[in-house]
Structure formats: structure tokens, C-alpha cells
């Protein structure tokens, strides 16, 4: 009985793993994604179309007008077809990768916009409740116009009482009582 020794093949958790051999080259996905976006942006410009057209025209003219010994793609432009197919086979995935990255950015922006809208709605609802409570509170507060109308009512009532009960001084007036 007692503790048994741990097998030697078991990895220790307090030490980093030794690096494993990889058969494929490693790359930074972020850098590759930025490169794909730059390529996709260039492929989507008029400049690319113009340059591609110029290259194809030069290719066709050279391989039809140049002496036979100088032609590098003599008969039915097989090498040109291969080059264009190769360019298309690389361009399509790079464009798709750039679109996927843009979709991810759009999704993040939409999520942030949605959260901002929720905060704005919550703030608006809070302010609406506060304004409603202030209006209710103001309904119970004496305003300047209400006090003025109440004072005018009191003055009218005093005038009526004075006409019914006229003021009669009862004794000598004391000047200091004012």
C-alpha cells in the first residue's frame, strides 16, 4: 500500500509542452487575411481590369506576330489559358476570404449597434418615466399663475367682506403698528 510512482510518459502540468513537429508551414491568419483583403480590393478595381487587358493583348499580339522562334505560347494559347485559370483559382478563394472577414466585421458592428440601441431605448424609457413623474409632481406644486389666481380670489373675497362689514377704527391710531 502506499503511493505508486507516476508513469514517466504522463506530461506534467507545471511545465510547457515540447513543441511538436509540424509538416505544414505556419502562418499568421490575421496577416494572411489582411493580404487577401488587399488582393481582393485590387482585383475589384478598374486598374486591375485595364492591366489584365493590356497583358492579354500583349500576350496575344506577341504570340501571333512575333517570329516562330520567339513565341512562348504558339498554338491555341494553351499557356495563356493555364495562366488565367491559375489566376482565377487563387483570386476566388482570396475574394471569399476577404468577404468572410468583412462579414465578421459587419456582424460585430451590428452586434455593437444592437447593444447601443438597447441602451438608447433603456435611457429613453428612463427619461420618459422621469418626465412623467415630474409632470405628475408639477401637478401638485403651486405655480406662479395658480398663486396669483388664489391671491386675486382672496382680494375679491376681502372686498366683499369690506362692503358687508365696513372698517371702523375703534380708537386712536398708533403710528408704530404699521
Image: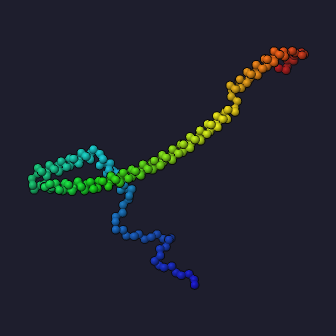
Residue pictured at 57% horizontal, 84% vertical: 1
* Residue in the foreground of this view, choosing between 34 and 170: 170
Specify whether 123 is left or right of 164: left
Residue pictured at 34% horizontal, 68% vertical: 23
Residue 20 placement: quadrant: bottom left
Residue 29 placement: quadrant: bottom left
Query: Which residue of the protein is positioned furthest toward the right in this rendering?
Result: 171
Specify whether 116 is left or right of 50: right
Residue 34 showing in the rendered view: no
Residue 130 showing in the rendered view: yes
Residue pictured at 18% horizontal, 56% vertical: 79
Residue 110, x across and y down, in percent: 45, 47
Look at the image and tell me in which quarter the C terminus lies. top right
* Residue in the foreground of this view, choosing between 93 and 34: 93
Residue pictured at 84% horizontal, 16% vertical: 165
* Residue in the foreground of this view, choosing between 2 and 111: 111
Query: Which residue of the protein is positioned furthest toward the bottom in this rendering?
Result: 1
Residue 73, x across and y down, in percent: 15, 55
Q: Is residue 3 above or below residue 165?
A: below
Q: How is the image coloured?
A: rainbow
Residue 103, x across and y down, in percent: 40, 50
Residue 36, x across and y down, in percent: 34, 53
Q: How many marks?
A: 0
Amino acid at each position: 500500500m502506499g503511493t505508486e510512482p507516476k508513469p514517466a510518459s504522463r506530461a506534467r502540468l507545471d511545465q510547457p509542452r515540447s513543441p511538436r513537429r509540424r509538416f505544414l508551414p505556419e502562418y499568421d491568419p490575421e496577416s494572411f487575411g489582411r493580404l487577401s483583403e488587399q488582393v481582393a480590393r485590387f482585383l475589384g478595381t478598374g486598374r486591375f481590369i485595364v492591366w489584365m487587358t493590356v497583358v492579354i493583348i500583349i500576350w496575344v499580339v506577341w504570340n501571333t506576330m512575333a517570329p516562330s522562334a520567339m513565341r512562348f505560347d504558339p498554338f491555341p494559347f494553351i499557356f495563356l489559358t493555364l495562366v488565367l485559370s491559375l489566376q482565377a483559382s487563387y483570386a476566388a478563394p482570396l475574394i471569399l476570404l476577404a468577404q468572410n472577414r468583412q462579414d465578421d466585421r459587419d456582424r460585430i458592428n451590428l452586434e455593437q449597434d444592437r447593444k447601443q440601441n438597447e441602451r438608447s431605448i433603456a435611457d429613453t424609457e428612463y427619461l420618459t418615466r422621469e418626465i412623467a413623474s415630474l409632470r405628475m409632481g408639477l401637478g401638485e406644486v403651486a405655480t406662479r399663475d395658480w398663486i396669483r389666481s388664489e391671491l386675486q380670489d382672496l382680494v375679491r373675497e376681502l372686498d366683499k367682506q369690506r362692503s358687508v362689514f365696513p372698517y371702523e377704527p375703534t380708537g386712536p391710531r398708533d403710528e408704530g403698528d404699521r
